[in-house]
Image (tube, rainbow, N blue to C red):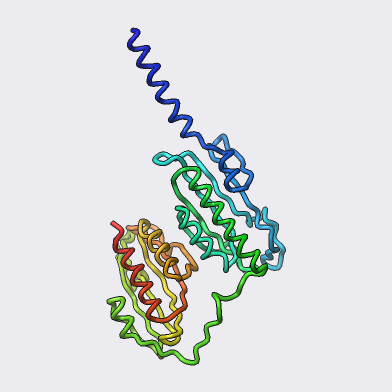
Amino acid sequence: MKQIILLALLGAVAALPFAAHAALDTNRIEQITGLKGTWSAAESVFKVTAPRADLPVSVDGWKMPPFMGLTSWAAFIEGKQAEAMVAGDLVLFEDEVNPVMSALFEHGVGVTALHNHFFFDEPKVYFMHIGGEGTVEKLAKGVKAALAKQKEIRAAQQQPARLFGKAFAPAANSITGSRIDEILSVKGQANNGMFKVVIGREAKMPCGCAMTKEMGVNTWAAFAGTDDNAVVDGDFAVLEDELQPVLKTLRAEGINIVAIHHHMTHEEPRILFLHYWGKGTAETLSRGLKKTLDAQKAVK
């Protein structure tokens, strides 16, 4: 009997450090992010918020209060495999999106969607959904870094920029497609000095029908301008596990992400689509895309 009691006590003592470790340190989250949070006892979630009130935003001609959907937030919950999990949504202007995305990646927080919530908004607003698992310290620092980068950009220039750097205006299109073919190992198509490559993949719909390359399940890249002054835009079709490596590689190569979303429902496997825009030499852009395709293929 004494042995049973002793074993029970030892088990309880051994569990104490785990319980203390597992509880969310909400004070630390507030301290790191610099934001006040609220605790939901019903869901065991701690959420910090940052209303976007630094610049007025009008939607459909109406100056919208942050309460109506212009508030960045990050919600923390105890994790199952890691100490904590975070999910959130950041309210960003166009010139903030990619620097903030890179700041998140540098701190181990993922990006899961990028899209608009409104039409006729001035300045244009985008919403970046985030997620990740890890220690409270790491996740909170990631949120802090993202918001700090956003503030840094607005401190340097109050009004959002309207261009990615300088305006792109080549006198004519004259892209050398053969070099792009060589780098990407894909045969492309030329059109009036522009050049486009398309890489297909396949998904199945509930009817058993195949969604293929010509049905819209593809990765593509279109080049315009000249070999020395080019622009590339396109779309990556990715599986869920491929999303973060592809995003991180594109950003590391200086290519901007402009949307992350789905194009279909009920497909198997699930396909996500991310749209991008880059400027530079055709060679540099092609090599950046090649690295991204390689990173995508490396995902098991």
Percent x, y of residue 283 = 37, 80
Q: Spot the residue most to the top.
A: 1
Percent x, y of residue 11 = 38, 21
User: How many marks can you see?
Assistant: 0
Q: Quadrant of the N terminus?
A: top left
Q: Would you identify the image quadrant in which residue 268 lies?
A: bottom left
Of the pair 112 and 116, the residue shown nearer to us: 112
224 vs 218: above or below: below
Q: Quadrant of the C terminus?
A: bottom left
Percent x, y of residue 5 = 37, 12
Of the pair 114 and 225, the residue shown nearer to us: 225
Relative horizontal placement of residue 42, taking residue 268 as reference (left or right): right
Of the pair 49 and 150, the residue shown nearer to us: 150
Relative horizontal placement of residue 292, taking residue 50 as reference (left or right): left
Q: Please tell me which residue is depicted at 55% across the width and 82% down the height of the picture.
A: 167
Of the pair 63 and 105, the residue shown nearer to us: 105
Q: Please tell me which residue is depicted at 45% across the width and 71% down the height of the picture.
A: 255
Q: Please tell me which residue is depicted at 47% across the width and 78% down the height of the picture.
A: 279
42 vs 75: above or below: above
Q: Please tell me which residue is depicted at 57% across the width and 65% down the height of the picture.
A: 96
